[in-house]
Image (cartoon, rainbow, N blue to C red):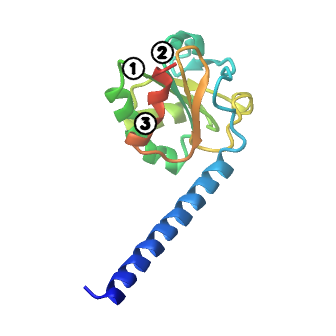
Amino acid sequence: MTRTKTRGRLRGALVFVLEALIFLAVVAGVHAWQTRGLLPAGASAAPPLELEDLSGRARSLAEFSGRPTLLYFFAPWCGVCAASADNLQRLARWRRDAVDVVLVALDYADGAEVAAYVERHGLTMPVLLGNAETARHWQVPGYPTYYVLDGRGHIRQRDFGYSTTPGLWWRTLPARLH
């Protein structure tokens, strides 16, 4: 191979690496901007949450203490939430012995709208009926927003937008370590 070809390939590889780093920096920047208003992750305790489920039964976040919990805030009209529904169901099935998945409906007309959404997507995890105060308390800027809590009720991960099943699985792993 000639020196010119080697330099050309090396330059092409360096350009590729530089473009990949720029792409990753842009993705990280967009992510930081989207999550800037969420509750902080780390050692901060999650706010209390006491809501009714679809059957009218009062439920509390305290019921899930001792186990990591993925708390997923959604709206029944949200297309991204609908696209994520199968991912949540798979996560709940794959990690049922390790993580509780709890859905919190926000921005809906009535419980029937939420129940229709749950049935349409075949969701089997608990669904709580939130309200504007819930969204404000949990700093939910849009849908879907989710928080991963450890077994002590501390926020370990938080995010906004679509996530794949492996992405959700990955985000729930650190919660088991605390």
Q: Which residue is mark 1?
A: 98
Q: Which residue is mark 2?
A: 67
Query: Which mark is on residue 58?
Result: none
Quadrant in the rendering for residue 5 = bottom left
Q: CA distance from mark 2 to mark 1?
A: 7 Å
Give residue 119's position: percent from left, percent from top: 40, 33
Give residue 174's position: percent from left, percent from top: 48, 28
**In the structure shown, which secondary structural element does the residue marked by tag 2 occupy?**
loop
Q: Which residue is mark 3?
A: 170
Q: Cβ–Cβ below 8 Å for labels 2 and 1? A: yes
Sequence-earlier tag: 1 or 3: 1
Residue 120 in sight here: no
Quadrant in the rendering for residue 169 = top left
Give residue 41's position: percent from left, percent from top: 64, 31
Instruction: Please say if 151 is above or below 9.
Output: above
Sequence-earlier tag: 2 or 1: 2
